[in-house]
Image: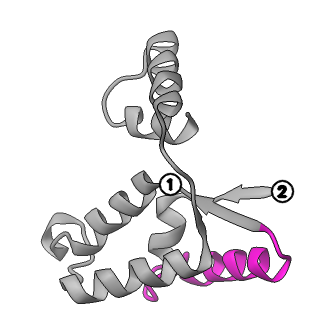
Amino acid sequence: MSVFIDTNVLLRTVQPSHSMHDPAVRAVSALINAGEAITLTPQIMAEFWNVATRPLENNGFGFPHNKAREELTRIENFFSLLSETTEVYREWKRLVVRYGVTGVRAHDARIVA
């Protein structure tokens, strides 16, 4: 089985002060220990970078460039990165048109695709 990890789970694993830090770390550790194939997409990595490097006053983590890069490398070492293809785009377009997806939810539709 393959398990897809969303941006918020990754973010919680690097934010020890967050109330969901421990549950996120436990969940990811349990999946790894169970030998599950954990996957994510380039979009998830970009969303992670966005929040990690965004200033604290703009609801980000304020990580310096080097720390964000280290976290991306750590994530890459643990999880499989799925490729984004023309077929993914076509499926995304089909979903947003069919279901009338608008605004920021279009990002989640891309993940579904």
Q: Secondary structure at mark 2?
A: loop
Position in image of residue 14 (x %, y %): 45, 83
Q: Which residue is mark 2?
A: 1
Q: Is residue 112 left or right of residue 100?
A: right
Residue at image coords 53%, 24%: 91
Residue at image coords 67%, 76%: 28
Residue at image coords 48%, 27%: 92
Q: Secondary structure at mark 1?
A: loop
Quadrant placement of the C terminus:
top right
Which of the labelled discs sits on residue 56, or is there none?
none
Give the quarter of the image for residue 78.
bottom right
Front residue of 56/7: it is 7
Q: Is residue 96 left or right of residue 60?
A: right
Front residue of 28/58: it is 28
Query: Most extreme residue toward the top, as rendered?
Result: 98
Front residue of 42/109: it is 42
> Number of labelled discs?
2
Q: Which residue is mark 1?
A: 41
Position in image of residue 44 (x %, y %): 44, 57
- For residue 6, above or below residue 77: above
Q: Is residue 107 magenta?
A: no
- For residue 9, above or below residue 71: above
C-alpha distance separating marks 2 and 1: 17 Å
Q: Is residue 27 visible?
A: yes
What amino acid is at disc 1?
Answer: Thr
Q: Which residues are magenta?
A: 13-36
- For residue 103, above or below residue 108: above
Q: Is residue 28 magenta?
A: yes
Q: Is residue 2 left or right of residue 67?
A: right
What amino acid is at disc 2?
Answer: Met
